[in-house]
Amino acid sequence: MKYNTVLQNIKTYEAGKPIELVVREFGIAAKDVVKLASNENPIGTSPAVQKAIIANASRAHLYPDDSMFELKNALAEKYLVQEENIIIGAGSDQVLEFISRAVLNENTSVLMSAVTFAMYEIYAKQMGAKIYRTASYEHKYDEFIEAYRMYKPKIIYLCTPNNPTGDATTKETVLEIINAIDKETLIVVDGAYMEYAIAKDETYAITPQDLMDFENVIYLGTFSKAYGLGGMRVGYGIAQPEIIEELYKMRPPFNISTLSLVAAIEACKDEKFVEESICLHKEQIKRYERFAKENGFTYIESYTNFITYLFDESKDSTTIADTLLKRGVIIRNLASYGMNAIRITIGTQKQNDIFFQHFSELIS
Ligand SMILES: *Cc1c(COP(=O)(O)O)cnc(C)c1O
């Protein structure tokens, strides 16, 4: 069987390891596994959302409302935009896929930072597009503009805050980059962790509103991180109606399940849950910063719900990640990104206690 040649240089995305795998492979009870690998909300799912899901369980035989009227309405209100500015995806991942399919082909290229969300590259490669990266993982104006002038990419990805590094780009720099790019290049501002950046430092706060004047910019958001709905798969893109209309042509019908819609709508009403999550996060991330300082290694200042620890040659991120895994602590090894580093989702107090306990033993 011969497959499309573009598939030859695509590496399958390696998702964060699930709890089930640790249970299966290492015989550790599920309740003892600490998962700090996929930037999920450690508090869990909002009780109000859980209630709504259960209350709607009997509607599972019905196709969902494909107009997604209620969810779009809630998002329009939240972001002060119109429903026609919004497309909903099965995670913002699916919106990324729509974007890629709508504008890329073998004769195009995309530009992104040196270390950023892995799916940008995979979706672009599926379309046969070329990948260009800037020299550093931060989103630097000069690096982006120089590469833009050289390669004229069809898409520029600005991931702020950035995953898997945790740093963010100021609103000022993002707008400077956007203003220096012509309208033939689509700029994707991926705000998957924006709630955390806003809570930390207003100069990094970017809202869809800030970008609505640009005909070639789309903002992406998700319910998977601060809103605690990773398992429901709901994300969104917000842009001028012309972009949304084109992306709609790529969308399969009923791409968001009935119960996922219910969950996301309810989550929009429960901002208190998000505030609580961020409150806990702010407390707990200090412990990770302190731990790094006390143990003499560096970390990247984080604007997200995770932190990236950087190691020198005395430590190996793969050994550390593998050893922690055998002890039932799942974190993310960044070796595949070319970094001797690990990314740890900030957990609950108890989860973090367990992480520090094992990690301390390992590095001493
Ligand atoms: C988690 C994440 C997404 C998308 O997550 P979904 O669950 O598909 O909504 C997008 N971009 C970045 C940078 C992420 O970390």
Image (spheres, helix red, strand yellow):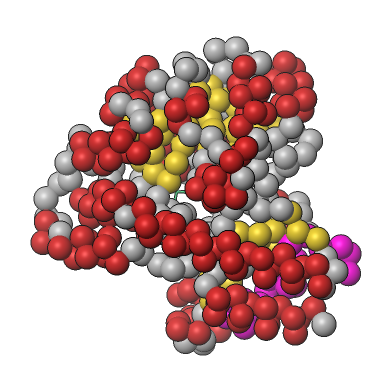
Residue 105, x across and y down, in percent = 52, 23
Determine the residue positioned at 44% across, 68% down. 43
Q: Is residue 343 visible?
A: yes
Seen from the viewer's position, the closer of residues 81 and 255 is 81
User: How many discs mark residues in the rendered view?
Assistant: 0
Residue 331, x across and y down, in percent = 61, 68
Q: Is residue 193 visible?
A: no
The boundaries of the magenta stretch are: 309-329
Q: Is residue 326 magenta?
A: yes
Q: Residue furthest right?
A: 313
Q: Is residue 260 above or below residue 103?
A: below
Which of the 4 quarters of the picture holds residue 354? bottom right
Q: Is residue 290 above or below residue 338?
A: below
Residue 122, x across and y down, in percent = 56, 41
Determine the residue positioned at 80% across, 61% down. 298
Which of the 4 quarters of the picture holds residue 203? top right
Seen from the viewer's position, the closer of residues 157 and 356 is 356
Q: Is residue 117 magenta?
A: no
* Quarter placement of the C terminus: bottom right
Determine the residue positioned at 72% across, 40% down. 138
Residue 149, x across and y down, in percent = 72, 16
Which of the 4 quarters of the picture holds residue 254? top left
Determine the residue positioned at 45% across, 75% down. 20
Seen from the viewer's position, the closer of residues 79 and 189 is 79
Q: Is residue 197 found left or right of 222 in the rendered image?
A: right
Q: Is residue 254 above or below residue 304?
A: above
Q: Is residue 41 found left or right of 349 in the rendered image?
A: left
Seen from the viewer's position, the closer of residues 167 and 103 is 167
